[in-house]
Image (cartoon, helix red, strand yellow):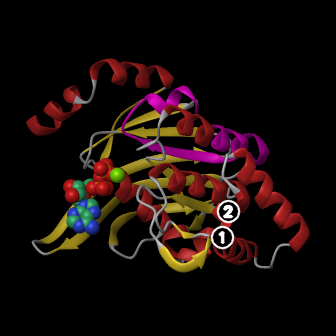
Amino acid sequence: MSVLEIRDLHVSIDTDQGTKEILRGVDLTIRSGETHAIMGPNGSGKSTLAYTIAGHPRYTVDSGSITLDGEDVLEMSVDERARAGLFLAMQYPVEIPGVTVTNFLRTAKTAVDGEAPAIRSWIKDVNASMAKLRMDKSFAERNVNEGFSGGEKKRHEILQLELLKPHFAVLDETDSGLDVDALKIVSEGVNRAKENTDLGVLLITHYTRILRYIKPDHVHVFVAGKVAEEGGPELADRLEDEGYDRYLSAATDA
Ligand SMILES: Nc1ncnc2c1ncn2[C@@H]1O[C@H](COP(=O)(O)OP(=O)(O)O)[C@@H](O)[C@H]1O
Ligand SMILES: [Mg+2]
């Protein structure tokens, strides 16, 4: 049983116009096996939270803490975070020219586990996961994200999730740009990871659609860089009906 704890997190970035504060006091606690949906309007800081957990150098933590089973995550390098069991599926996965999916996955697995996977069982695992995600075998020989469709990029993120077996996964808008069939396939992959490894999930999404397939235990509404409201799955249903207007006018009034 693991716990990822975020306490009063304040994060800013440097822009041409000076320093911009984006996260303004985020509190979140996620335990193994739990799925937390982070929902909120565009620009509310959801991706900033995801990148900060993963350790992207662009984001400066001004105050607050992130701990994993009491260990200070903010003191860890990006690699150390991955080895500690943190995983980020990016909203906009990046191209890695000259690196095939096969090589990328094997290198990542070796880095995360601290030793190379046994070749025969590894190939079996990769093929099985690709088949379940309805990915053609030829996919393995393509360069990472180069010319991938939106759906292929997201499947590749979930393929990594299934193979790397992290303790906590941050999934940043994994539903964006997916048609219903791809959404189901990707969601099934996340649900398999949940069942097989007691994964804790931070599911970032603008829309409630994916929550029909991946059931959240907790829903947090993110507005202007912090959690504005929390509840159970019923909160997502209400957002489906009402949208974010209520929170946005409250944030402007404040
Ligand atoms: N690299 C960046 N440069 C400039 N502004 C940024 C950068 N990253 C985020 N922001 C700004 O921070 C705010 C939050 O962005 P983001 O975390 O991407 O929100 P969300 O994922 O909820 O849409 C936005 O106003 C966005 O313009
Ligand atoms: Mg985002």
- The residue at 46%/19% (across/down) is 234
Q: Amino acid at mark 2?
A: Ser
* Residue 228 at x, y percent in the picture: 31, 37
| Dot 1 alpha-carbon crowd within 10 angstroms: few under 14, some 14 to 19, many 20 or more | few
* Residue 61 at x, y percent in the picture: 35, 69
Q: Which mark is residue 3?
A: none
Instruction: Looking at the picture, tell me which residue is in the foreground, 201 or 108.
Output: 108
Instruction: Evaluate whether residue 25 shows in this view.
Output: no
Q: Amino acid at mark 1?
A: Glu
Q: In the figure, residue 136 lies in which quadrant? A: bottom right
Label 1 belongs to which residue? Answer: 141
* Residue 25 at x, y percent in the picture: 32, 52
Label 2 belongs to which residue? Answer: 138
Question: Alpha carbon of mark 2 to alpha carbon of mark 1: how far?
Answer: 6 Å
Question: CB under 8 Å between callouts 2 and 1?
Answer: yes
Q: Is residue 123 left or right of residue 52?
A: right
What segment carries the magenta color?
188-214
